[in-house]
Amino acid sequence: CRSSACQHPTGLLIKLSEPVDFDSVDKQPVDLVFALIVPEENTQEHLNILQAVAERFQSEILLSQMRAAKNPKALYNIICSPV
């Protein structure tokens, strides 16, 4: 989302301990959730970040590594590493 209270793009990745049924397109339960907040006036930056995240999350290898992460630090390191 875009918010006037936000000064810098901020992302949050959550790895759920128990997947939830979210009526997803692939009919798989959801276990990884990404949220993005950007400054209200940053419409193009918002779209650019979403595109980059969507492209990155197409990697089955990356998704498998994220799901196997044992702690937040490991998950962070996986996300920050090149694909």
Image (tube, helix red, strand yellow):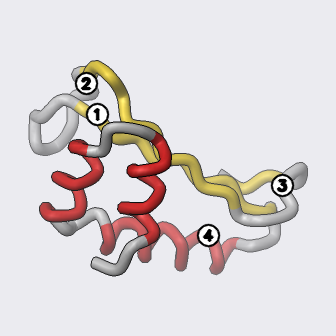
> Mark 3 to mark 4: distance in Å?
12 Å
Q: Residues within 10 Å of mark 4 (few under 14, many from 20)?
A: some
**Residue shown at 27%/27% (left/top)?**
22
Q: Secondary structure at mark 3?
A: loop
Give the residue pinned by disc 1: 31
Residue closest to the eye, 21 or 10: 10
Q: Secondary structure at mark 4?
A: helix
Q: Of marks 2 and 4, which one's residue comes earlier in the chain?
A: 2
Quadrant housing residue 56? bottom left
Give the residue pinned by disc 2: 19
Going by the numbered disc 2, the residue's amino acid type is: Pro
Going by the numbered disc 4, the residue's amino acid type is: His
- Is residue 78 rendered to the left or right of residue 8? left
The reply to whether the C-beta atoms of the residues labelled 2 and 3 are less than 8 Å apart is no
Q: How many marks?
A: 4
> Mark 4 to mark 1: distance in Å?
23 Å
Q: Secondary structure at mark 1?
A: strand
Rendered location of residue 59, percent (x, y) = 19, 68
Q: Residues within 10 Å of mark 2 (few under 14, many from 20)?
A: few
The reply to whether the C-beta atoms of the residues labelled 1 and 2 are less than 8 Å apart is yes
> Mark 2 to mark 4: distance in Å?
27 Å
> Mark 2 to mark 3: distance in Å?
29 Å
Give the residue pinned by disc 4: 46
- Is residue 45 rendered to the left or right of residue 54? right
Q: Of marks 4 and 1, which one's residue comes earlier in the chain?
A: 1
Give the residue pinned by disc 3: 6
Q: Of marks 1 and 2, which one's residue comes earlier in the chain?
A: 2
